[in-house]
Image: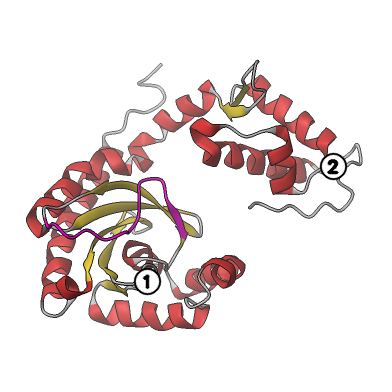
Amino acid sequence: MVHIVKGHDDMPQASGTQAVDRALALLKIAGRAGAKGVSLTGLIQQTGLGKPTVRRLMLALMRSGLIEQDTESRLYYLGEESYVLGTQATARHGLLEVAADAVVRLARRSGDTAFVNMRRGASAVCLHREEGAFPIRTHALTAGAQHPLGVGAGSLAILAALPDAEVETVLADNASQLATDFPEITPEVLRREVATSRARGFALNPGRVVPGSWGVGVALRRADGTVVGGLSLAAIESRMQPPRDAELAAILHHEAREIETRLARRLTHAPSEEETT
């Protein structure tokens, strides 16, 4: 839920920054709704804004092409301009296109389930899941699932790769959701896991999210050192014990280096605006 403190929500004059923040919050909600769409009522409930404000901001987003509304259902969806902006961001943020073949190789080589996650603020989103050949599967992430950073092996690897100050910001941002959805994964637990992951060289999830489903993960970085996502493998507990956990981490690191090289090359060769006009 994206909750915005109302204050004097329906006052006719809101600050420019406040209006932008509210419009972006609405845009993100529509994006998370995906193909299901989101109703006006749903937007009001998720933001705490008044109906006139939500309608006004959604109309502005529709005029820009970032949002569209189905004429029959009246549900809101991301618009054509959102798609265009997304394609223009692919050179920097198109992680799935760059990492998809690596995820397939990881699943084939390990026999376990492989994932690639992308960082999204204080959360990690699963972009792709590839099943391995081992007959016993774990009930781990599915594509599109979003967890607070630190929840799950790939997500924990992302958190551990961040600077200490940013780790604390993330933990503060996620404190409420952790307490509600993952009460056993407290900020204190995550601080210990971050330290352990850094010392070990990879993240290990010992069944904290789903009992019996263990995972190992490593972070993915852009050329400038910022963290873009994570790679991970999940399996039943018996397949994640030493020394196999470190062996899996080694092949994750190998694929991570390949992906990072491609990301750097792709960004370097991305056409400029002048070249595309």
Residue designated by label 2: 14
Residue 207 or 257: which is nearer the viewer? 207
- Image x and y of residue 113, in percent: 21, 56
Give the residues drawn in magenta, as a range: 134-147
Q: Secondary structure at mark 1?
A: helix
Q: Earlier in the sequence, mark 2 or mark 1?
A: 2
Residue 21 or 124: which is nearer the viewer? 124
Residue 210 or 190: which is nearer the viewer? 210
Amino acid found under the numbered disc labelled 2 = Ala
Hey, which quadrant is residue 257 in on the image?
Answer: bottom left
Label 2, label 1: how far apart the Cα atoms are: 39 Å
Amino acid found under the numbered disc labelled 1 = Ala
> Image point 48% across, 78% down: which residue?
184
- Image x and y of residue 35, in percent: 49, 31
Above-or-below relation of 113 to 206: above
- Image x and y of residue 262, in percent: 21, 44
Q: Indicate yes or no whether the magenta region holds residue 122.
A: no
Label 2: how many residues lie within 10 Å, few (<14), some (14-19) or many (20+)?
Answer: few
Q: Is residue 160 left or right of residue 18?
A: left
Q: Is residue 74 left or right of residue 262?
A: right
> Image point 24% across, 41% down: which residue?
98
Residue designated by label 1: 160
Q: Secondary structure at mark 2?
A: loop
Q: Is residue 203 left or right of residue 165?
A: left
Mark identifier at residue 36: none
